[in-house]
Structures are given as structure tokens and as C-alpha cells.
Amino acid sequence: MERTLCIIKPDAVSKGLAGQILSKIISEGLKVVGLRMLHLSKAEAEGFYAVHRERPFFSDLVTFMTSGPIVVAALEGKDAISRYRRLMGATDPAKADEGTLRKLYAESIQNNAVHGSDGPDTAKIEVAYFFSTVDLVG
Ligand code: ADP
Ligand code: MG
């Protein structure tokens, strides 16, 4: 069993897509073991994306991620990290496979609807960024 962090980003939440996206995740057999809605502060978004702070898109990314509410979900399942990455599709929706969340719902390489942890170490850090152990079920 593995856990991973999903974020439904402000673009998707503002379009009312959170329910549809969670429904697709659950249909793939991933279990939602934690769920919250929140509006990130600048400091919280900068902390979450700290690994990207030297990238040219960092400041725009922080502005985007603080532009409205997000929905964060902790997902659990066998190989949850790679299965959820596959369901999300490529970072750039133009390169994402048919049927993936980003192909279906993303607007651009930045406003790309969803986030997913990229490996076991980041998944642990990212789940803990939003959820205490007592907030997770199962
Ligand atoms: P992923 O979310 O697929 O793991 P990255 O970790 O590389 O992708 O990037 C984190 C987020 O930064 C992306 O999901 C996207 O919102 C934004 N981003 C990545 N690359 C670019 C880019 N070239 N221009 C603008 N925004 C970007
Ligand atoms: Mg990433």
C-alpha cells in the first residue's frame, strides 16, 4: 500500500470540476483517505513548491496556486503514486494522453488542473504538508 498527494488546482476548482475529478480517481480504484478544501497563502504555496524556487515559472506558479481555493486529497492504493501520475497525464496538456485528467481538464502547462506526488519520498512529505496522521482514515 502506498499513499500519494492529489491537489485539484484553483483552475479546476473554480470551474466546479472537483467532484468529477475525485470521481475519476475513485473509479480507478484509488481510495481517498484524506480530503480538505483550503485557500493557500503565498508562504504555504512557496513552501509546497520549494523544489521549484529556481525555475523561471516559480513566481507565476505561486500566484496561480494562491488565486483561489484548492482541494487536497490523500490517496491510497497499491502503486498509488505511479497509478495516479498515469491518470493525471503529462504536465503539458498538449502532450497528455487521451482520457487523462490533464487532457480532459487542463487549460495550459501552468493551469493544469491537478498535482500528484512524483515519488515515495515526495509523497510522504506532501501528504504530511496537508494532513496529520489523525486526519487520515483507513
Ligand atoms: P508535474 O506537476 O507534472 O509534476 P512539475 O513538477 O515539473 O510538473 O511542475 C510543477 C508545476 O509547475 C506544474 O504542474 C505546472 O503547474 C507548473 N509548471 C511546470 N512547468 C511549467 C512551465 N514550463 N511553465 C509554466 N508552468 C509550469
Ligand atoms: Mg512535480
Image (spheres, rainbow, N blue to C red):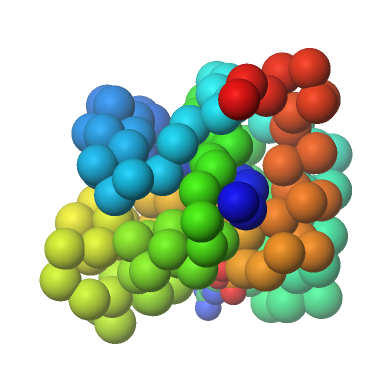
Q: Position of residue 113 (x, y in %)?
A: 39, 50
Q: Is residue 77 visible?
A: yes
* Left or right: where 114 falls relative to 98: right
Q: In what quadrant of the picture does the C terminus appear? A: top right
Q: Quadrant of residue 73?
A: top right
Residue at 22% over, 76% down? 97
Tally the marks: 0
Q: Position of residue 48 (x, y in %)?
A: 77, 49
* Left or right: where 86 falls relative to 78: left
Residue at 24% over, 42% down? 27
Quadrant of the displayed image that contains ligand 1 = bottom right
Q: Position of residue 80 (x, y in %)?
A: 51, 56
Residue at 32% over, 38% down? 26
* Left or right: where 89 falls relative to 81: left
**In the rendered view, would you say 86 is above or below 40?**
below
Hey, which residue is sitting farthest bottom in the picture?
95
Q: Is residue 111 visible?
A: no
Residue at 53% over, 41% down? 75
Instruction: From the viewer's side, name the closer residue of 26 and 49.
Output: 26
Q: Quadrant of residue 42?
A: top right
* Left or right: where 119 falls relative to 6: right
Q: Position of residue 109 (x, y in %)?
A: 41, 69
**In the rendered view, would you say 39 is above or below 17?**
above
Instruction: From the viewer's side, name the closer residue of 85 and 83.
Output: 83
Instruction: From the viewer's side, name the closer residue of 111 and 128.
Output: 128
